[in-house]
Structures are given as C-alpha cells and as structure tokens.
Image: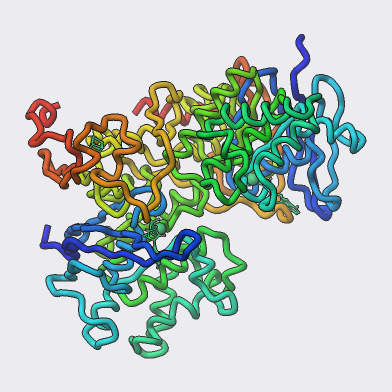
Amino acid sequence: MVTPLVNIQGLNVAFNGVPVLRGVDLTLEKGEAVGLVGESGSGKSVTWLAALGLLPRHASVSGSVRLDGREILGAPAGELDRVRGGRVAMIFQDPASALNPVLTIRKQLCEALALHRDLSGEAVKAEARQLLDLVGIPDAARRLEAYPHEFSGGQVQRIMIAMALAGNPDLLVADEPTTALDATIQAQILELLSSVRREMGMAMVLISHDLGVVAENCDRVAVMYAGRIVERAPANQLFADPVHPYAQGLIGALPPLDGPRRRLTAIPGTVPDPARMPSGCAFAPRCALAAEPCGLAVPSLAPIANDRVVACIRAEASRRALLGIAAE
Amino acid sequence: MSGPLVEVSSISRSYAMRSGMFGHSTAVHAVDGVSLTIPKGETLGLVGESGSGKSTTGRIVLGIEPPDRGEVRFDGKPMAAPGTAAWRAQRARMQMIFQDPLGALDRRLPVATQIREPLDVHGLGTPAEREERVRELLRAVELTPAHGARYPGALSGGQRQRIVLARALATKPDFLVCDEPVSALDVSIQAQVVNLLCDLQAQLGLTLLFISHDLRVVRQISNVVAVMYLGRIVEIGSADDLFARPEHPYTQALVSASPAPGRRSAGRIVLAGDPPDPAARPQGCAFHPRCPRAIARCASEVPALTAVGGNRQVACHLATGPRAETRDAA
Ligand SMILES: Nc1ncnc2c1ncn2[C@@H]1O[C@H](COP(=O)(O)OP(=O)(O)O)[C@@H](O)[C@H]1O
Ligand SMILES: Nc1ncnc2c1ncn2[C@@H]1O[C@H](COP(=O)(O)OP(=O)(O)O)[C@@H](O)[C@H]1O
Ligand code: SF4
Ligand code: SF4
Ligand SMILES: [Mg+2]
Ligand SMILES: [Mg+2]
C-alpha cells in the first residue's frame, strides 16, 4: 500500500478537561482534495490546528498524525516550524488578520520565500512577483509595494494564497477561505484554488460549512458532528445518497435553487454542549431514527461500501428510509 | 389576492462619503430609482452582493430613513412624517429583524421581558394579558416559558433569532422587513427558522420584505425576487423561475456562482474583477466592466428595467421582450 500523505488516527483534543475531538480518523492521499463539513463547533478547525501543533497550551492532544508516515504530533518545535508553511500551508476565513498591516506585500512574501526556499536577493523578488501574478493580482510588480489595506477582501485572500504557495506545499488546509466573501468573488477564489492545485499537484483540505462549496471542489468529503467524523464518502456519492441521519439532515436542510420548492427538512434541536455530551451516539437527541441501542455506545465508523464509512448503528435502516423517500 | 400593502416608487438615496487623501466628499448612490410592489400576504425577496443597497432599501421602506427622491406608500397611504402620531401608528404595523440577534437583544434582561417590551411601550392590554401574550408568542416561535426566563447569552443563535421574531410579532404587525435574518445561522438551524417564518406568515397573513445574499434561502421564502446591483434593480421576476432561467447577465453569474451539490465547477461563469465601488459607479450599465456580454452601447447608455414577458423585468440592452411563447410553453 502507498503511504498516505496525511494519516490522522484517533485524534483527541480536550480543553480544560472537556473533550471536543473524540477520536478523529482521516487520511489524505497525495494530490487529493478532501472536504470537511459540519455545523459550527463540530471540530473542523480544531482537527487541523491540533494536527499542525497550533493549539494553545491549555489544549490536551492525543492520538497520531503522520505526514508521509512520520509522526508529527508532539514533534519538536523546530520540525513543526518546517512542516508549517513548508510542506503544509494553511489559509483562513479572515485573511487580513494573518497579514502584517504595517509591512508591504513584497516584504511579507519575500520573508515567506526566504524562510522556506533556498533563494536570495533578486531571485526572491522575482519569485514574489511571479507568485502574485499566479494568484491573479493585476499589475503585480507595482502592487508588491502596496500595504494589505490597499487591497479588497478577495485580493487579500489571493495574497494569502500566494503566501501559502511560497513554501511549495504538498498540502493546503483552507479553513472557510471564502466564507467572508461575496458570491462572485467566492467563485473566483475557488477557481484559483483548483487551478493552482492542478498545476502544483497539491493536496487540499477544504473546511466549509457550505455543502455546495465542498461538493463542487472536493474528491472526498468527511462529515463531522460533535467532535467525530460520522460519514466519509466520495463527494458525488455523499450528496446523492447520504447515509448517516445527520448527513441526510444537512442535505435536506439546504433549499434547492431550482425545481419544485418543498418544505425544508430541518434538523430539530441544536448541537450538544461539549461539556454535556449525551451518552452513546451524540446525534441521538436530534435523530429521527434513534432507538434504544443508540444511547448505549458511541457508534464507530464502519465500512458500508467501497471507500465509504458511516458511524451509525442503524445505517441500514437509514439507507432504507432514504430509499423509501426516493421511491415515493 | 387583495391590493398591494407596500408600494415603493422610484426611491433614491445617496450618502456623502469622504474619500481620497484630500478628503473630497463624493456621493455614494446607495439606492437609485428603485420601485417595488408587495401584495398583501406575499413575500418579496431582495438579493445582491454586499453594498448593492439592500439594507438601505429596507430602512427606507420601513420609514426609518427618508428617501432623497421617490415615495413609499403603506396600505394605500404615503408614509407619514417621522415623529408624528400618524407615523407611529403606521410604524406599529411594521417590524424588522436583523442578522445579529445578540446585538438586537439586551444581554442584561431575561428574553421574556424583552418580548413584552413593545406591549408595555404601546400600552397594549392589562399586565396579565401581556404575560399571556408573551407565553403565546413563545409558543408561536416554538419555545417554552423556560426559554423565556433565560438571558440571551444562555440561548443558541437560532433560539435568539426566534426571540427577536417573537418580539417583532408582539404588536401583531402586518409587515416585516427581514434583513439577512438567517445568514449567521448553521444550515440546519437556518432551515428551522425559514420553516417557522413560512408557517407564521401563512397563519398570520404577514407581508414580508426578505433581504439576503443567499439565493437559495430567498427563493425558498419569496413569491417574487428582485436582484440588485449597485443600487438598482437589474432583474425581477417570480421566485419559481428567476434562478432557473435568469435573463440578466449578472443574475446568470450569481446563479452560476452559487455552488450546488452534485455539480462540479466546470462551465461556471466566473466574473472578472471586484465588485465595483458604489462611490465610483461606472457610466452606462453599471455592470458593464464585468459583463461577459457587454457591447459598445453598454458603456454609455443606462438600460431601463423592461418587461420581457411573464412577470419578468430585466435591465439589459440585450434583453429583448416580450419573450417568445415557446419559452412560456416549455
Ligand atoms: N482555544 C480554544 N479553547 C477552548 N475551546 C475551544 C478552543 N478552540 C475551539 N474550542 C472549542 O472546540 C470545539 C470545536 O471548535 P472548532 O474546531 O473551532 O469548530 P468548527 O471549526 O467546526 O466550527 C468548539 O466547542 C469550540 O468552542
Ligand atoms: N448611513 C450610511 N452612510 C454612508 N454610507 C452608507 C450608509 N448606509 C449605507 N451606505 C453605503 O451605501 C451602499 C449600500 O449599502 P447597503 O444598503 O448597506 O447595502 P447592502 O445591504 O446591500 O450590503 C454601500 O456602499 C454603503 O457603504
Ligand atoms: S446511531 Fe442511532 S441516534 Fe445515532 S445517527 Fe444512527 S440511528 Fe441516529
Ligand atoms: S446592458 Fe450590457 S453590460 Fe449591462 S448587463 Fe446587459 S449586456 Fe451586460
Ligand atoms: Mg472553524
Ligand atoms: Mg445589508
């Protein structure tokens, strides 16, 4: 078997003794795009912050995160520094906060390039201009001398992508990269991400609360609920035929853009408080299919088809219920 | 259906904005010649990107802010001058809900007290009747008296938005302006609030102006949808087919930019450039610098909103109306 690019196994995170990640398993092959969806607070960001050693000290982290087979969880600070921004880069929803407002874009790009690539002097400047060109900032040579506030929100996100590409990463973790942007700008950024990914053969983790964004831009999708992955599937299959009742609920809650309008199937209730997690399946209090055994033990991820896993003891029943609806 | 409850005729509003290093004052045309009609009991949806003038339109329709030009009529009568008794009577029949329920609520008061507030202010009913009305309102938004006893901080985002809705309904308004009411909520909670709004509208015969940048949510709740771009309506038509068959190049780009499960991004229209600055609105069709179909005329001549058949109106030089019957038959 080929070693996956990233292999996360049994990742646990607790803040002040309150568990918020409860055994996350996720692998990522070289060059592939994996989406992470789920309601806010489900642990999407914490998964990657923990994997990259970016959580504050009061977080306790356990489990295993391997990059090319090499354990990086708990690795020495120097090694993690080389991983971050080098082999793995991250971009966030709020790019402005990740840039230094008092330094020109050239200065910040050159710093990132000097740190991660063996370049110096004129070569750094030329590369910085090329990166800015690559992410579609017009008039790159002149714009290098500008400060972050002189760019629009969409352009700042392009600059963040340029910074992320400076280390020539194998993996880009994009955490809600377009959530703060308008629809037409979101489309531009997503297109940019997929074109640089193709060009550089880079893998991507796309974290988003927007199912459509993930569906369109990812090969595989993992659905998170209350600190666990509850379903993992190829993107087209997940959206055509979700099996976990929570995944079904998320898709049913999305209003259609065309075709007949139907009443939305809202998921009742709210996500549980991490400090008061129900016993057994965390989704049970909101689940229409919940039965007595659901409260007994936390269902583990089990295969239901090639490349598909679901954490629901009634996966079969839920699948039948879905087919029943589809047959109507 | 009975006549219109809200009639907006050619309203415009601009703001002075200081810009540039010499502090020049430029005019931002937030809303420019917008006309809308909302029949009683129906919902008009307003979509567009940020800065397109949706919230300004909402404030003018509510009479919170007067237009520079144009007129708003409510139930057949012009909006009364702010501060007058007639204005207060009209305003009691209109309410609004915003995106941020936490900002709209007082963190130091139990939420039931805040639902009762408009009843106290308008002196509606005896204290006992007010208490009963609060319980009734909590039930209407599918919450319990126990929720009413809590402070805003102890409720989830979706529950807070229900409280804001309950308070808005306290005075039994006829008209509700909802400005991005579910934009901050997770999709499953968004669906709860959208369903609730639809149910309450059907029960109470409410008329709604529903503002959002989210095409899906707007379509779900609206009878008619208007698309705004830089202060003007560029397309308006029935919610059922506007997004299925958009006519205006901007609406087409918006629909194309709206990600859909089960579709890969191939064939997407990706507009070049940033959304323009409202303080520097392009001449002619304001969309022309980004429009993939622009012709010479677009740079100089403003396209008028024109009927193209059905109940669709489009502001584009390339839209030729009325539509051929073949499309209606399809
Ligand atoms: N630094 C932190 N300290 C304490 N709790 C945190 C911290 N960061 C995240 N959490 C908690 O961890 C859980 C998961 O958060 P997060 O991963 O940010 O969710 P998502 O990205 O899915 O919205 C939430 O309950 C959140 O409140
Ligand atoms: N009170 C105000 N003062 C100055 N400019 C304003 C004011 N309100 C809105 N604007 C400007 O008017 C334009 C339209 O704003 P708005 O109606 O809030 O748009 P939307 O709700 O569609 O995002 C924007 O450029 C905004 O900056
Ligand atoms: S395990 Fe039970 S409660 Fe959990 S999702 Fe499956 S059916 Fe629902
Ligand atoms: S009028 Fe011209 S620029 Fe404007 S939308 Fe139509 S074709 Fe495009
Ligand atoms: Mg997050
Ligand atoms: Mg607004």
Q: Residue at x 83, y 31 (%)?
A: A82
Viewer-proximal residue among A229 and B25: B25
Report the image quarter containing ligand 6. bottom left
Viewer-proximal residue among A237 and B249: B249
Q: Residue at x 87, y 27 (%)?
A: A71
Q: Position of residue A172 (x, y in %)?
A: 67, 30
Give the residue at the far top of this rendering.
A1
Query: Quarter-wise, where is residue B299 in the image?
Result: top left
Q: Position of residue B105 (x, y in %)?
A: 51, 72
- Residue A292 seen in the current view: no
In the image, residue B116 sits, relative to residue B236, either above or below, namely: below
Q: How many marks?
A: 0
Give the residue at the far right of this rendering.
A76
Q: Position of residue B157 (x, y in %)?
A: 54, 59
Viewer-proximal residue among B121 and B211: B211
Taking B105 as reference, is A312 left or right? right
